[in-house]
Image (spheres, rainbow, N blue to C red):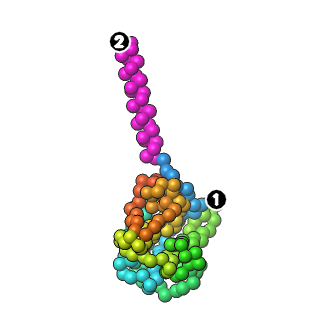
Amino acid sequence: MRKERLAKRGIAAGVVVLLLSLLMGTQAYAYTLHYWKMDTSIWYRASYLFGDETREGFRSRMSAWNQYLPEWRRLCYDANVHYDSGYPSRDGRNQIYKEPMAASKTGAENKVWYDQIGSMLYVRESDINLNWNVSWTNGYDPSRVDTQTVMVHELGHTVGLHHSEHRWAVMFEETYAGYLNRDLTSDDINGVRNRYL
């Protein structure tokens, strides 16, 4: 009888340890944070060089992040286009460009400027550039890069996330032609919640 009780306790303890490790695992994350975050909504205007479908996709990618951001700190889409060049501009406007980049293998970049208030840095401007020299598409094409996969990643930098170690996360450092990854994963969501809760 005593052996039976010990065995049951051992099994119960094992189950508790397993449940705790699973619980801890779901809360764990493999991202790093930038030193900044948004303290107000960021309004983006896209270049006229992007078609309607691409611009609408940008708005959808902003909505993906907005589900996990406080109401007064959102990524917003301005339906007007801009005709500016000279990325990054640092002109007080948040703009999405399509210009050539010196490093032709770099698909995109997000340049963020911020102000320091106390110990925290708050985003004041973000300019994103999708490299003109990359062959872009909206959707799956084995020889081209999906604009929406790249945009959801770059917007993650605006909200304050750096790169994730998880290959399946939106915030993983690399993407490639023929790869679609538009939906936030638990790692991305845990990251943005950590930043704003």
Horizontal arrangement in the rendering, residue 135 relative to residue 102 (left or right): left
- Is residue 138 or residue 92 the one in the foreground? 138
Image quadrant containing the N terminus: top left
In the image, what residue occupies the spot 39% across and 12% down? 2
Horizontal arrangement in the rendering, residue 110 relative to residue 9 (left or right): right
In the image, what residue occupies the spot 46% across and 83% down? 47
Residue 144 coordinates in the image, percent (x, y):
41, 73
Which residue matches tag 2? 1
**Mark 1: amino acid:** Ser
Horizontal arrangement in the rendering, residue 60 relative to residue 44 (left or right): left
Residue 180 coordinates in the image, percent (x, y):
39, 65
Q: Which residues are magenta?
A: 2-27
Asked if residue 30 lies in the magenta stretch, the reply is: no
Sequence-first disc among 2 and 1: 2
Considering every residue shown, the one lying at the far bottom of the view is: 83
Q: Nearer the viewer, mark 2 or mark 1?
A: 2
Mark number displayed over residue 119: 1
**Residue 148 seen anywhere in this rendered image of the structure:** no
Compared to residue 165, the image places residue 55 above or below, namely: below
Q: Quadrant of residue 189?
A: bottom left
Residue 86 coordinates in the image, percent (x, y):
57, 84
Considering every residue shown, the one lying at the far front of the view is: 143
